[in-house]
Amino acid sequence: MCGMPQQPPVRSSPTRPSRPDASMSLITNVMDHSLDDGYAEAAARRKTQGGGGLPKTLRAKLGLASGLVLAGLVVTLGAAQARVAAPVVAKERQELIDRIDTETSAADRLEGSVDKLRDEVGARQRAALRSSGGSTEADLVGLLSGATPVHGPGVKLVVNDAKEASGGGEGSNPRETSGFSDTGRVRDRDMQRVVNGLWASGAEAVSINGQRLTALSAIRAAGDAILVDNKPLVPPYTVLAVGDGQKLSTRFQDSPDGLYLHALRENYGVRATISTEGDVRLPAAPSVIVRTAQPLADTTEKGTS
Protein backbone atom coordinates (compact mmCIF):
# COMPACT_ATOMS: atom_id res chain seq x y z
CA MET A 1 0.00 0.00 0.00
CA CYS A 2 1.43 3.16 -1.12
CA GLY A 3 1.15 6.29 0.82
CA MET A 4 2.88 9.42 1.84
CA PRO A 5 6.23 8.75 3.44
CA GLN A 6 6.09 9.42 7.10
CA GLN A 7 8.49 11.93 8.51
CA PRO A 8 10.40 10.86 11.50
CA PRO A 9 9.39 12.69 14.60
CA VAL A 10 11.47 15.75 15.28
CA ARG A 11 13.21 15.50 18.54
CA SER A 12 14.88 18.44 20.11
CA SER A 13 18.50 17.97 20.93
CA PRO A 14 19.18 17.81 24.64
CA THR A 15 19.92 21.27 26.03
CA ARG A 16 23.09 21.95 27.96
CA PRO A 17 22.36 22.16 31.67
CA SER A 18 22.56 25.74 32.97
CA ARG A 19 25.10 26.75 35.58
CA PRO A 20 23.82 26.87 39.13
CA ASP A 21 25.14 30.40 39.45
CA ALA A 22 23.67 31.65 36.20
CA SER A 23 21.46 34.09 38.07
CA MET A 24 24.58 35.58 39.63
CA SER A 25 26.25 36.41 36.33
CA LEU A 26 26.43 40.11 37.15
CA ILE A 27 28.19 39.48 40.45
CA THR A 28 30.49 36.93 38.77
CA ASN A 29 31.36 39.46 36.09
CA VAL A 30 32.17 42.08 38.68
CA MET A 31 34.38 39.64 40.58
CA ASP A 32 36.17 38.52 37.46
CA HIS A 33 36.69 42.10 36.26
CA SER A 34 37.19 44.00 39.49
CA LEU A 35 39.31 46.60 37.70
CA ASP A 36 37.86 48.57 34.86
CA ASP A 37 39.40 47.74 31.48
CA GLY A 38 40.52 51.31 30.97
CA TYR A 39 42.31 51.40 34.31
CA ALA A 40 43.88 48.03 33.59
CA GLU A 41 45.18 49.24 30.23
CA ALA A 42 46.56 52.44 31.81
CA ALA A 43 48.32 50.44 34.54
CA ALA A 44 49.81 48.09 31.97
CA ARG A 45 50.99 51.00 29.83
CA ARG A 46 52.68 52.71 32.80
CA LYS A 47 54.32 49.46 33.74
CA THR A 48 55.62 49.05 30.19
CA GLN A 49 56.92 52.62 30.05
CA GLY A 50 58.45 52.36 33.49
CA GLY A 51 56.36 55.22 34.89
CA GLY A 52 54.96 53.36 37.89
CA GLY A 53 56.38 52.06 41.15
CA LEU A 54 59.26 53.60 43.04
CA PRO A 55 61.50 56.21 41.42
CA LYS A 56 64.34 54.72 39.37
CA THR A 57 66.91 57.51 39.25
CA LEU A 58 69.08 58.57 42.17
CA ARG A 59 67.80 62.15 41.97
CA ALA A 60 64.21 61.04 42.24
CA LYS A 61 65.01 58.78 45.16
CA LEU A 62 66.78 61.64 46.97
CA GLY A 63 63.78 63.91 46.35
CA LEU A 64 61.37 61.36 47.76
CA ALA A 65 63.57 60.80 50.80
CA SER A 66 63.86 64.55 51.38
CA GLY A 67 60.05 64.94 51.21
CA LEU A 68 59.51 62.15 53.69
CA VAL A 69 62.09 63.60 56.07
CA LEU A 70 60.50 67.06 55.78
CA ALA A 71 57.02 65.69 56.46
CA GLY A 72 58.27 63.77 59.50
CA LEU A 73 60.04 66.90 60.76
CA VAL A 74 56.89 68.98 60.45
CA VAL A 75 54.82 66.39 62.33
CA THR A 76 57.49 66.09 65.04
CA LEU A 77 57.71 69.88 65.51
CA GLY A 78 53.92 70.18 65.68
CA ALA A 79 53.68 67.49 68.32
CA ALA A 80 56.51 69.07 70.32
CA GLN A 81 54.88 72.52 70.21
CA ALA A 82 51.52 71.06 71.26
CA ARG A 83 53.19 69.27 74.14
CA VAL A 84 54.98 72.45 75.24
CA ALA A 85 51.85 74.63 74.89
CA ALA A 86 49.54 72.21 76.72
CA PRO A 87 50.72 73.12 80.25
CA VAL A 88 50.49 76.84 79.40
CA VAL A 89 46.92 76.51 78.17
CA ALA A 90 45.95 74.42 81.18
CA LYS A 91 47.52 76.98 83.51
CA GLU A 92 45.68 79.89 81.85
CA ARG A 93 42.41 77.96 82.03
CA GLN A 94 42.89 77.25 85.72
CA GLU A 95 43.74 80.92 86.37
CA LEU A 96 40.55 81.96 84.59
CA ILE A 97 38.51 79.49 86.66
CA ASP A 98 40.09 80.82 89.85
CA ARG A 99 39.26 84.40 88.86
CA ILE A 100 35.66 83.46 88.15
CA ASP A 101 35.37 81.74 91.53
CA THR A 102 36.91 84.72 93.29
CA GLU A 103 34.64 87.25 91.58
CA THR A 104 31.61 85.07 92.23
CA SER A 105 32.44 84.91 95.93
CA ALA A 106 32.92 88.68 96.02
CA ALA A 107 29.57 89.20 94.28
CA ASP A 108 27.87 86.89 96.80
CA ARG A 109 29.38 88.85 99.69
CA LEU A 110 28.23 92.14 98.18
CA GLU A 111 24.76 90.75 97.63
CA GLY A 112 24.65 89.67 101.27
CA SER A 113 25.71 93.16 102.33
CA VAL A 114 23.01 94.69 100.15
CA ASP A 115 20.36 92.44 101.71
CA LYS A 116 21.55 93.35 105.21
CA LEU A 117 21.51 97.07 104.41
CA ARG A 118 18.09 96.72 102.80
CA ASP A 119 16.73 95.10 105.97
CA GLU A 120 18.27 97.85 108.07
CA VAL A 121 16.74 100.55 105.88
CA GLY A 122 13.36 98.85 106.10
CA ALA A 123 13.56 98.65 109.88
CA ARG A 124 14.48 102.34 110.12
CA GLN A 125 11.63 103.27 107.82
CA ARG A 126 9.14 101.32 109.90
CA ALA A 127 10.50 102.94 113.05
CA ALA A 128 10.16 106.37 111.46
CA LEU A 129 6.56 105.63 110.47
CA ARG A 130 5.72 104.59 114.03
CA SER A 131 7.37 107.67 115.52
CA SER A 132 5.54 110.04 113.17
CA GLY A 133 2.07 109.00 114.36
CA GLY A 134 0.03 106.41 116.13
CA SER A 135 0.69 102.74 115.78
CA THR A 136 -2.49 102.13 113.79
CA GLU A 137 -1.69 104.89 111.34
CA ALA A 138 1.90 103.67 110.96
CA ASP A 139 0.71 100.14 110.26
CA LEU A 140 -1.73 101.42 107.65
CA VAL A 141 0.93 103.54 105.98
CA GLY A 142 3.35 100.60 106.00
CA LEU A 143 0.70 98.35 104.48
CA LEU A 144 -0.22 100.79 101.74
CA SER A 145 3.40 101.59 100.91
CA GLY A 146 4.50 97.95 100.93
CA ALA A 147 7.12 98.56 103.59
CA THR A 148 5.85 95.79 105.87
CA PRO A 149 5.06 92.12 105.17
CA VAL A 150 1.38 91.22 105.27
CA HIS A 151 -0.74 88.10 105.39
CA GLY A 152 -4.42 87.32 105.35
CA PRO A 153 -7.18 85.88 103.18
CA GLY A 154 -6.95 86.48 99.47
CA VAL A 155 -6.60 84.86 96.07
CA LYS A 156 -3.89 83.01 94.21
CA LEU A 157 -3.72 83.55 90.45
CA VAL A 158 -1.28 81.50 88.37
CA VAL A 159 -0.67 82.63 84.78
CA ASN A 160 1.52 80.64 82.41
CA ASP A 161 2.42 80.52 78.73
CA ALA A 162 0.54 78.25 76.37
CA LYS A 163 1.78 74.68 76.16
CA GLU A 164 2.50 75.00 72.44
CA ALA A 165 2.88 78.68 71.63
CA SER A 166 2.54 79.28 67.90
CA GLY A 167 4.96 81.60 66.17
CA GLY A 168 3.58 85.02 65.45
CA GLY A 169 4.02 86.34 61.94
CA GLU A 170 3.33 89.61 60.21
CA GLY A 171 -0.34 90.43 60.37
CA SER A 172 -3.02 92.61 61.81
CA ASN A 173 -3.30 90.71 65.08
CA PRO A 174 -2.31 93.16 67.86
CA ARG A 175 -0.56 90.38 69.80
CA GLU A 176 1.80 89.84 66.86
CA THR A 177 3.08 93.41 66.68
CA SER A 178 4.77 94.00 70.04
CA GLY A 179 8.11 92.34 69.37
CA PHE A 180 7.34 88.91 70.81
CA SER A 181 7.64 85.93 68.49
CA ASP A 182 4.99 83.77 70.16
CA THR A 183 1.32 84.67 70.45
CA GLY A 184 0.88 82.15 73.24
CA ARG A 185 3.37 83.81 75.57
CA VAL A 186 2.38 85.97 78.50
CA ARG A 187 3.54 89.54 78.00
CA ASP A 188 4.25 92.49 80.23
CA ARG A 189 1.03 94.26 79.29
CA ASP A 190 -0.93 91.12 80.16
CA MET A 191 0.52 91.12 83.67
CA GLN A 192 -0.11 94.86 83.93
CA ARG A 193 -3.79 94.31 83.23
CA VAL A 194 -3.95 91.41 85.68
CA VAL A 195 -2.40 93.44 88.50
CA ASN A 196 -4.48 96.54 87.78
CA GLY A 197 -7.61 94.40 87.69
CA LEU A 198 -6.80 92.96 91.13
CA TRP A 199 -6.19 96.43 92.57
CA ALA A 200 -9.47 97.66 91.09
CA SER A 201 -11.31 94.61 92.45
CA GLY A 202 -10.33 95.43 96.04
CA ALA A 203 -6.87 93.89 96.60
CA GLU A 204 -4.99 95.43 99.52
CA ALA A 205 -1.55 94.05 98.61
CA VAL A 206 -0.22 92.24 95.53
CA SER A 207 2.96 90.31 94.72
CA ILE A 208 4.25 88.48 91.63
CA ASN A 209 6.59 85.53 92.15
CA GLY A 210 7.39 86.82 95.63
CA GLN A 211 8.08 90.36 94.37
CA ARG A 212 5.94 92.85 96.34
CA LEU A 213 4.31 95.55 94.26
CA THR A 214 4.04 99.15 95.42
CA ALA A 215 2.76 102.38 93.99
CA LEU A 216 6.22 102.88 92.44
CA SER A 217 6.53 99.40 90.92
CA ALA A 218 6.85 98.96 87.17
CA ILE A 219 6.14 95.92 85.00
CA ARG A 220 8.16 96.10 81.82
CA ALA A 221 9.62 93.87 79.12
CA ALA A 222 13.27 93.37 78.24
CA GLY A 223 13.54 91.21 75.17
CA ASP A 224 11.34 88.20 75.88
CA ALA A 225 11.53 88.55 79.68
CA ILE A 226 9.08 90.29 82.01
CA LEU A 227 10.68 92.56 84.60
CA VAL A 228 9.15 93.72 87.88
CA ASP A 229 11.19 96.56 89.31
CA ASN A 230 14.05 95.56 86.98
CA LYS A 231 14.07 91.96 88.26
CA PRO A 232 13.35 89.26 85.65
CA LEU A 233 10.53 86.82 86.31
CA VAL A 234 10.29 83.22 85.16
CA PRO A 235 6.95 81.64 84.23
CA PRO A 236 4.64 80.47 85.63
CA TYR A 237 3.70 83.82 87.17
CA THR A 238 2.13 83.38 90.61
CA VAL A 239 0.15 86.42 91.67
CA LEU A 240 -0.91 86.65 95.31
CA ALA A 241 -3.40 89.28 96.45
CA VAL A 242 -4.62 89.99 99.98
CA GLY A 243 -8.28 90.85 100.33
CA ASP A 244 -11.73 89.41 100.76
CA GLY A 245 -11.02 86.15 98.96
CA GLN A 246 -14.39 85.22 97.48
CA LYS A 247 -15.47 88.76 96.66
CA LEU A 248 -12.05 89.58 95.23
CA SER A 249 -12.11 86.49 93.00
CA THR A 250 -15.64 87.16 91.74
CA ARG A 251 -15.05 90.86 91.11
CA PHE A 252 -11.83 90.21 89.25
CA GLN A 253 -13.29 87.52 86.99
CA ASP A 254 -16.24 89.78 86.15
CA SER A 255 -14.05 92.83 85.54
CA PRO A 256 -12.80 93.86 82.07
CA ASP A 257 -9.30 92.73 83.00
CA GLY A 258 -10.57 89.34 84.16
CA LEU A 259 -12.51 88.95 80.88
CA TYR A 260 -9.34 89.95 79.02
CA LEU A 261 -7.45 87.13 80.75
CA HIS A 262 -10.29 84.75 79.92
CA ALA A 263 -10.02 85.78 76.25
CA LEU A 264 -6.28 85.05 76.29
CA ARG A 265 -7.02 81.61 77.67
CA GLU A 266 -9.71 80.84 75.10
CA ASN A 267 -8.04 82.32 72.00
CA TYR A 268 -4.32 81.78 72.59
CA GLY A 269 -4.11 78.89 75.03
CA VAL A 270 -2.63 81.01 77.85
CA ARG A 271 -3.07 79.01 81.04
CA ALA A 272 -4.61 80.77 84.03
CA THR A 273 -6.13 79.45 87.26
CA ILE A 274 -7.52 81.40 90.20
CA SER A 275 -8.30 80.07 93.65
CA THR A 276 -9.45 81.47 96.97
CA GLU A 277 -6.92 81.12 99.79
CA GLY A 278 -7.51 81.31 103.52
CA ASP A 279 -4.11 82.84 104.25
CA VAL A 280 -1.55 84.25 101.81
CA ARG A 281 1.73 85.80 102.86
CA LEU A 282 3.39 88.65 101.03
CA PRO A 283 6.91 89.90 101.82
CA ALA A 284 7.81 93.52 102.24
CA ALA A 285 9.08 95.46 99.25
CA PRO A 286 12.89 95.39 98.95
CA SER A 287 13.14 99.14 99.39
CA VAL A 288 10.67 101.96 99.58
CA ILE A 289 11.88 105.30 98.33
CA VAL A 290 10.40 108.19 100.29
CA ARG A 291 9.83 111.28 98.19
CA THR A 292 8.76 114.63 99.58
CA ALA A 293 7.66 117.76 97.80
CA GLN A 294 9.18 121.14 98.61
CA PRO A 295 7.60 124.49 97.72
CA LEU A 296 9.41 126.49 95.11
CA ALA A 297 11.19 129.67 96.12
CA ASP A 298 9.46 132.95 95.39
CA THR A 299 10.58 133.91 91.90
CA THR A 300 8.51 137.09 91.52
CA GLU A 301 10.62 140.00 90.45
CA LYS A 302 10.93 142.78 92.93
CA GLY A 303 9.92 146.26 91.99
CA THR A 304 7.15 145.27 89.64
CA SER A 305 3.87 147.09 90.03
Image (spheres, rainbow, N blue to C red):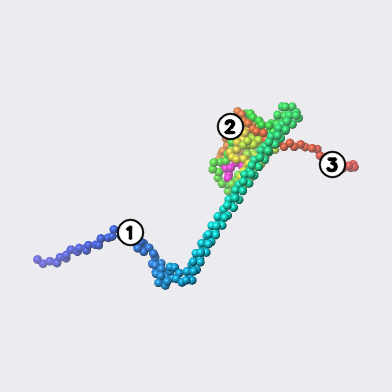
Q: Residues within 10 Å of mark 1 (few under 14, many from 20)?
A: few
- Whichever of labels 3 and 2 marks the residue nearer the N terminus, that label is 2
Amino acid type, residue under disc 3 in the picture: Thr
Residue range in magenta is 182-188
Where does residue 282 sit, x and y in percent of width and height?
Answer: 64, 32
Give the SS element for disc 1.
Answer: helix
Q: Residue 238 carries which label?
A: none
Point 18% across, 63% down: residue: 9
In this picture, residue 22 sits left or right of residue 274: left
Instruction: Determine which residue is flagged by label 2.
Output: 275
- Whichever of labels 1 and 3 marks the residue nearer the N terminus, that label is 1
Residue 79 painted magenta: no
**Nearer to us: label 2 or label 1:** 1
In this picture, residue 153 sits left or right of residue 140: left
Residue 185 painted magenta: yes
**Magenta-highlighted stretch: main secondary structure?**
loop
Amino acid type, residue under disc 2 in the picture: Ser
Distance CA(mark 2)–CA(mark 1): 77 Å
Residue 123 at least partly seen:
yes
Q: Which mark is residue 299?
A: 3
Q: How crowded is mark 3: few (under 14 residues within 10 Å), some or many (20 or more)?
A: few
Where does residue 172 sit, x and y in percent of width and height?
Answer: 60, 47
Give the SS element for disc 2.
Answer: strand
Point 33% across, 59% down: residue: 24
Amino acid type, residue under disc 1 in the picture: Met
Residue 219 at least partly seen:
no
Give the SS element for disc 3.
Answer: loop
Q: Which mark is residue 24?
A: 1
Distance CA(mark 3)–CA(mark 2): 57 Å
Image quadrant assignment for residue 14: bottom left
